[in-house]
Each structure stands twice: as structure tokens, then as C-alpha cells.
Image (cartoon, rainbow, N blue to C red):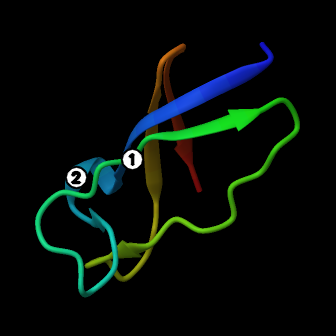
Amino acid sequence: MDSVKITDIVPNRGKCKVGGILDQGKVKINKVLKYRQVWDYIPITGCGKLLEVQVKTDKGEWNFKF
């Protein structure tokens, strides 16, 4: 694939929140990554330890466990 659009990130099965301390409500994610591009900054709050992340894209969903 030449690009993928990230539409949602669900850390720890929804037990954590995506967004910084000052964000109000649910953060809208609409990030397009081209081939070999990396996104370094994803603010996650409200959890002590990140164990699992579900990444939803326009090409499908993927789960990552740490």
C-alpha cells in the first residue's frame, strides 16, 4: 500500500484515553501515513502501563500487544 489513514486508536481496550490532559472529549484522529513514514507523537493518558493498542485504519484493524 502507498498510504494508510489512521482513523482511531484504542489503547488497553478503551481503559486509557487518546489525547493530552487539556483535550476535552474524544480526540478525532485523521492521520495519513505514506509508505515508510512514521508518526512519533500519539498522546495517551489515564493509564499506568500500555499493554495493548488497537489501530483502526481505512484498510482494516490491527492489534498490537506489548
Q: Residue at x 26, y 65 (%)?
A: 17
Tell me if label 2 and label 1 are in contact, CB under 8 Å.
no
Image vertical order of residue 19 relative to residue 65, above or below = below
Residue 29 marker = 1
Name the residue furthest right.
36
- Residue 29 x %, y %: 39, 47
Image vertical order of residue 60 relative to residue 53, above or below = above
- Indicate left or right for 27 with 7 as reference: left
Looking at the picture, which amino acid does disc 2 mark? Gly
The foreground one among 35 and 11 is: 35
Q: Residue at x 45, y 48 (%)?
A: 53
Point out the image quarter for the C terminus. Answer: bottom right
Image vertical order of residue 62 relative to residue 48, above or below = above
- Indicate left or right for 52 with 48 as reference: right
Residue count near mark 2 (Cα–Cα under 10 Å), binned few <14, some 14–19, many ≥20:
few
Residue count near mark 1 (Cα–Cα under 10 Å), binned few <14, some 14–19, many ≥20:
some
N-term mark: 2 or 1: 2
Name the residue furthest left.
25
Residue depth check, mark 2 versus mark 1: number of the one nearer the observer: 1
- Residue at mark 2: 14
- Residue 22 x %, y %: 24, 86
Looking at the picture, which amino acid does disc 1 mark? Ile
Point out the image quarter for the N terminus. Answer: top right
Q: Residue at x 23, y 76 (%)?
A: 23
Distance from Cα at disc 2 to Cα at disc 1: 15 Å
The foreground one among 25 and 45 is: 25
Say what secondary structure mark 1 lies in: loop
